[in-house]
Image (cartoon, coloured by chain):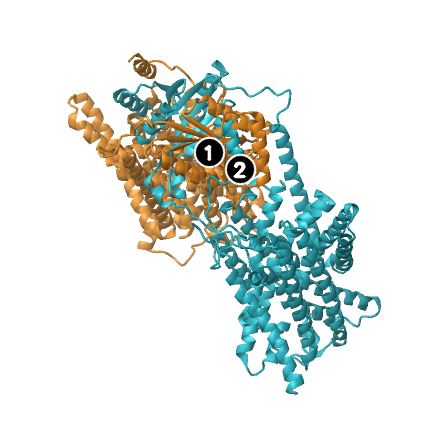
Chain colours: A cyan, B orange
Amino acid sequence: MPKLASVTKRLLVGRPFRSDRLSHTLLPKRIALPVFASDPMSSVAYAPEEILLVLSVAGASAYVFSPWIALLVAVVMAAVVASYRQNVRTYTSGGGDYEVATVNHGPRWGLVVGSALLVDYVLTVAVSIASAASTIGSAVPLVASHKVEFAVGAIVVLTAMNLRGVRESGTAFAIPTYAFVFGILAMIVWSLVRVYVLGGDVRAESADFELVEEHGSLAGLGFAFLILRAFSSGSAALTGVEAISNGVPAFRKPKGRNAATTLLMMGVLAITMFLGLIMLARLTGAQVAEDPAHQLIGAPADYEQKTLVAQLANAVFAGFPPATWYVIFFTGLILVLAANTAFNGFPVLGSILAQDRYLPRQLHTRGDRLVFSNGIVFLAGFAIVLVVAFDAEVTRLIQLYIVGVFMSFVISQSGMIRHWTRLLRTETDPAARRRMRRSQAVNAFGFAMTALVLAVILITKFTQGAWISLAAMAAIYALMSAIRRHYQRVGEELQEDDDDPPIRLPSRNHAIVLVSRMHRPTKRALAYAKALRPDRLEAVTVNVDDQDTRHLVAEWNKQNFSIPLKVVESPYREITKPVLDYVKRIRTDNPRDVVTVFIPEYVVGHWWEQLLHNQSALRLKGRLLFEPGVMVTSVPWQLASSAKVHDRTTPAPGAIRRGIYSKNGDRQEP
Amino acid sequence: MPKLASVTKRLLVGRPFRSDRLSHTLLPKRIALPVFASDPMSSVAYAPEEILLVLSVAGASAYVFSPWIALLVAVVMAAVVASYRQNVRTYTSGGGDYEVATVNHGPRWGLVVGSALLVDYVLTVAVSIASAASTIGSAVPLVASHKVEFAVGAIVVLTAMNLRGVRESGTAFAIPTYAFVFGILAMIVWSLVRVYVLGGDVRAESADFELVEEHGSLAGLGFAFLILRAFSSGSAALTGVEAISNGVPAFRKPKGRNAATTLLMMGVLAITMFLGLIMLARLTGAQVAEDPAHQLIGAPADYEQKTLVAQLANAVFAGFPPATWYVIFFTGLILVLAANTAFNGFPVLGSILAQDRYLPRQLHTRGDRLVFSNGIVFLAGFAIVLVVAFDAEVTRLIQLYIVGVFMSFVISQSGMIRHWTRLLRTETDPAARRRMRRSQAVNAFGFAMTALVLAVILITKFTQGAWISLAAMAAIYALMSAIRRHYQRVGEELQEDDDDPPIRLPSRNHAIVLVSRMHRPTKRALAYAKALRPDRLEAVTVNVDDQDTRHLVAEWNKQNFSIPLKVVESPYREITKPVLDYVKRIRTDNPRDVVTVFIPEYVVGHWWEQLLHNQSALRLKGRLLFEPGVMVTSVPWQLASSAKVHDRTTPAPGAIRRGIYSKNGDRQEP
């Protein structure tokens, strides 16, 4: 069987036919960092502020604890980064937490992580855009007074851009991300220079107000609870760290090590900025209150509380507004970029879940505008609902956000612990065992820290919104399980059983060409049907209008075809039923024959033309498919307008984070 | 050519295959009357009241003119009925005014009539339901205080019933229509008996209020204008008369004469009821005011103005509420029935317009739930908009209604005049010429009267809402012309020109079976493709996932098919593009071959299953159709769930008014 051999050879050796000449260029670390780090680093823009906001409930005195809380967050962050460095070195396929959970804890836990991540994408959009609105509102008062409208508008614009197929390019990420990092670090350094070198004083605009506690004084347990709440809000700084684990395939080789290095760079930068900002807040005396109108004594009546970053930039670069604007602008931009990340990550996750049959199969294959569009609209719709429901208040949205993120952290890290335990069972080389034990210890520490944080989140945030995320996850979990079960059932149905009758070759082919009028599409259909040399060939027309039919028969006789024309009566001017009944009758008379129905179809260029053509043909086709032993063949006739539809090749969503990336920063289409 | 001869014979002599065993029973007159007359007779429920309402603006004294105005309306009505008796005798095909206008004035005028009638259907629903709401509101105060909500609710219920496929049956029309006529006539007779035989007094509840004029006194021209307005409002009584001309085919033979007789009966009944109600209003002193709160002096503070019919029934049957309720109930019911008529007449008109290519072709054929559903939703949607926009006020909606009706009256009658002129040109028999001249005179009188009314309507109602109808008609006219032009253009494109290359038989058939996995649907597709004995046959799979593909190739080798399996690479996990490129390459290499692509397709029973299956196949199919020289064959595999979809045979809309009607009053399905 030389043919089959060649098939196998083709598959294993060469590529007989390449559909796509895209350069599959991999990401160098300097580009990978901004691509994957825009999301985790953007959270630096709001996490420090959230700590101060929670503490503000207990008044200015509670601010003393902010550096310690920040330090604790930084420790957890370091632990998580260290842990994920193990993840990316071990699981390089891009499956991320979902893969780690599935492999080590089984598919159910994988699905839990998948549900959590899906919810997270929605919240990434909502939180990032809400934060961007606050940031930009700190410079543009109009935005501050219309925060919800601005946020919804921004989501709509992002959605439109992504629906149009905006290209994710390395450059587009690199410039704003590095500019943001540069801005924040410059701000920190310059403040230190001003205070400690030049001996000046850097005071935030809110430093001189008196921050009073919100609802009477908190004591004992209440205060401890507040500290925990501040800690869990600050943990928002960790959101997005897991992103790199989904992008390992996009790295250059050695993929795992490069990803781990990038993760380390990201961690160092994020922790530095995070701690720097908290330090700067203490240095400048910046204060943010949950309820500025009542808590800030001494503030002017029209005082509009700016974001922490904006206050700090104002203070540090006092007298040089361009620098302030730079920081605010790039902070806003990186937040928008982080939201855009979700639009690109969502389909990637969907594709992975679809591969395991938890989502419709077509999500697995790419280049699918329709599915992608639905996903984008879905994502944007939910994000808008959240933004509106929570008044675009970052503080309130954060409560929903972190629970999902930490849930996947915890599951993933515990999975890694199992992973090492499993490997240790068979490994005998002492050096390797030592390395494994060390890695396991790192993951165990990560697990302990994230589990602790998750517990704190659940205790302090459950009633404040975390329950909404949990309920959404449960619903998504149930839906995805149901989809999987459905595919399972269908798969079993399609599997050959021993008691199924074998599929036999049909004995003869009875071809029917549907004819409505005598024109070129009909003639082409007849010519094609003839070329197939069926055992029987006849043309069938439905007599919807006596006069038309008479005319058709006369034409038919004149044209002198060697194909008989059958006239099917339809007293009630239906088309589907008469044809269906006719086909059924043929099937009944010759059950072993296969019936091929040829339907001439117009191919049109505009959607509204579709409304004017083919509707009867489509309906008939839909019904004929329900008949066993019937094949339906569309013989297309391309109308002139169809030429207007050209191959719209838009980049696949998330292309760049999968490594489909060319040197000039754009995805190239042949 | 014996085959072709037999085809011709089949068409002209017998029916070799009947798809449908429906009994095509025709309507006896006693059933035809209620079926077609519910719409025109229901207008008796609001037309008399509208005359009084308009007159009320000038105070009670203007009521003196009401009998004279009513008499004028009755004369016009008689003229219209007489005219339409000519129409139905002459044009028996059911094309109605549209046909008369098209044949005698050309297609443009036919289209004007068509546009007018489409607008009328929407207004029939809005006016009838609004009037039903007022009528029922006269007995149920809750409805009166929530008229808009009730009307919208009623339209929604009607829509739902029609979407579910409610059957129009003769009985359903006969009982309420005859009950309504009986109720109104009984009310008139009983009032005469009470007053003139028993010598009692019948006073309406509003008789003792003092009706004052609305905005100062009207004099001279203003008053004359008011009288004209009252007349044109009263002309609403004529709406629906044209309905019978669309239903002639449903009558028993001699169709034309039976339809004319039915029209006469309807006319006599409607005029009797109309004049009787106006007379009764004078007799009982019933008063209705446009603005009851300010115009009715002496009315209690919580006085809720009832409809005229309700006031009369209350007065005539005082002391015997069941009779009052009977009249109100059946008046409300016949109004709802009239609205339902529009749901059935709309698709009939659409079918006629579609036959002439003014609307999408699929409207021409019947039994089309999808199209019908769209039509119903469309109709209901616009009717709801109107009801809400005009607060379900019959008085305001009437202004929009009558302009379209009278426009088609006028065009139709002038068409009939031309019709007779044309016939007279060739007719020589003096007796026949006399008959024709008489008929022409009748139509001329009808034309004169309706043209006069139309002029009055345009003068008195244009700014009060008639312009909205005219604008809507213009828009519909433009849309339908555009559709017609599109079909024209496509028709020309499809016509064979001398310089077009002739359609040749493709030299060979290259068959491709798309394979994704090895299961029964794939095997069936392979077996079918083999049975067609193509010149070349190969299986093609897209390598979306290396592991899956390896597995498939291994299975393929094991199964030992004699068909080669081609693996098409797809580095970006797309399906459509690789297959498309592959097919294009085959076409380029062998331009005279035809390529047949076999796509195994799952047939499922639920819409949500469709979301989970076939999406890639459908998209691929859609794109392949754009390739010249490619046929796409669906090889269906019926999943178990598809068995749940049984042949849903619902009655075609408007079946009964086309004569598809069986003895037991229901349409029968075999």
Task: From the viewer's perspective, tell me whether residue B104 is left or right of residue B350.
Answer: left
Q: Position of residue B8 (x, y in %)?
A: 31, 16
Q: Which residue is mark 1?
A: B188
Give amino acid for label 2.
Leu
Picture residue at 49% right of the left edge, 27% below the top:
B563
Outermost residue, right side: A220
Circle number at residue A311: none
Per the image, label 2 sits on a secondary structure element best described as helix
Determine whether A606 is above or below B528 in the image: below
Q: Position of residue B332 (x, y in %)?
A: 51, 37
Give amino acid for label 1.
Ile
Q: Are marks 1 and 2 in contact (CB under 8 Å)?
A: no
Dot 1 crowding, Cα within 10 Å, few <14, some 14–19, many 20+: many
Per the image, label 1 sits on a secondary structure element best described as helix
What subunit carries mark 2?
Answer: A
Q: Which residue is mark 2?
A: A11
Q: Tell me, yes or no, whether dots 1 and 2 are on the same chain.
A: no
* Of A417 and B252, the residue lying toward us: A417
Q: Position of residue A297 (x, y in %)?
A: 69, 79
* Of B629 and B400, the residue lying toward us: B629
* Of B414 and B608, the residue lying toward us: B608
Which-is-in-front pick, marks 1 and 2? 2
Task: From the viewer's perspective, tell me whether residue B74 is left or right of residue A303.
Answer: left
Q: How many marks?
A: 2
- Residue B327 visible within the image: no
Determine whether B369 is above or below A65 in the image: above
Dot 2 crowding, Cα within 10 Å, few <14, some 14–19, many 20+: many
Q: Position of residue A249 (x, y in %)?
A: 59, 52
- Distance from label 1 to label 2 (Cα)? 92 Å
Determine whether B614 is above or below B30 in the image: below
What subunit carries mark 1?
Answer: B
- Residue A648 visible within the image: yes
